[in-house]
Image (cartoon, helix red, strand yellow):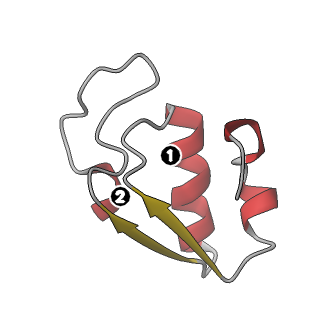
């Protein structure tokens, strides 16, 4: 399990796959780290309402992890 402060691209690259189980809130920096992890070949499995809100709790306009 990764704590919020460890959700960096460098840390994520240590794992071939990460699972985000109903992680509704991700900061813009965390979301960017996850997107870069995927573009570098990592696999993300999500379910529930993953990344639907930013760090302030505001709803995101798009389905952020589908990009």
Judge whether 1 appears above or below 8 on screen.
Answer: below
In-front residue for pair 45/22: 22
Quadrant of res 16? bottom right
User: For the residue labelled by badge 2, is the local secondary structure a helix, a strand or a loop?
Assistant: helix
The quarter of the image holding the N terminus is bottom right
The picture places residue 43, in percent across and down from the top left corner, at 53, 79
Res 43 label: none
User: For the residue labelled by badge 1, is the local secondary structure a helix, a strand or a loop?
Assistant: helix
Q: Residue at x 25, y 33 (%)?
A: 60
Q: Residue at x 54, y 47 (%)?
A: 32
The picture places residue 31, in percent across and down from the top left corner, at 50, 46
Return the residue at label 2.
65
Q: In whole angstroms, how far apart are the C-alphas of marks 1 and 2?
A: 8 Å
Task: Name the N-terminal-most of marks 1 and 2.
Answer: 1
Q: Is residue 25 left or right of residue 53?
A: right
The picture places residue 61, in percent across and down from the top left corner, at 18, 35
Instruction: Please tell me how crowded label 2 is: few (under 14), some (14-19), or many (20+) other residues with Cα within 10 Å.
Output: some
The quarter of the image holding the C terminus is bottom left
Q: Is residue 33 left or right of residue 45?
A: right
The picture places residue 13, in percent across and down from the top left corner, at 76, 70
Q: Residue at x 73, y 49 (%)?
A: 8
CB under 8 Å between discs 1 and 2? yes
Q: Residue furthest left?
A: 61
Return the residue at label 1.
31
Res 53 visible:
yes
Quadrant of res 6? top right
């Amino acid at each position: 399990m990764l704590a919020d402060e460890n959700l960096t691209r460098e840390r994520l690259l240590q794992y071939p796959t990460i699972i985000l189980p109903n992680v509704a809130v991700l900061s813009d920096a965390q979301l960017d780290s996850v997107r870069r992890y995927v573009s570098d070949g990592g696999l993300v499995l999500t379910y529930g309402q993953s990344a639907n809100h930013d760090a302030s709790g505001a709803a995101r306009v798009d389905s952020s992890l589908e990009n």
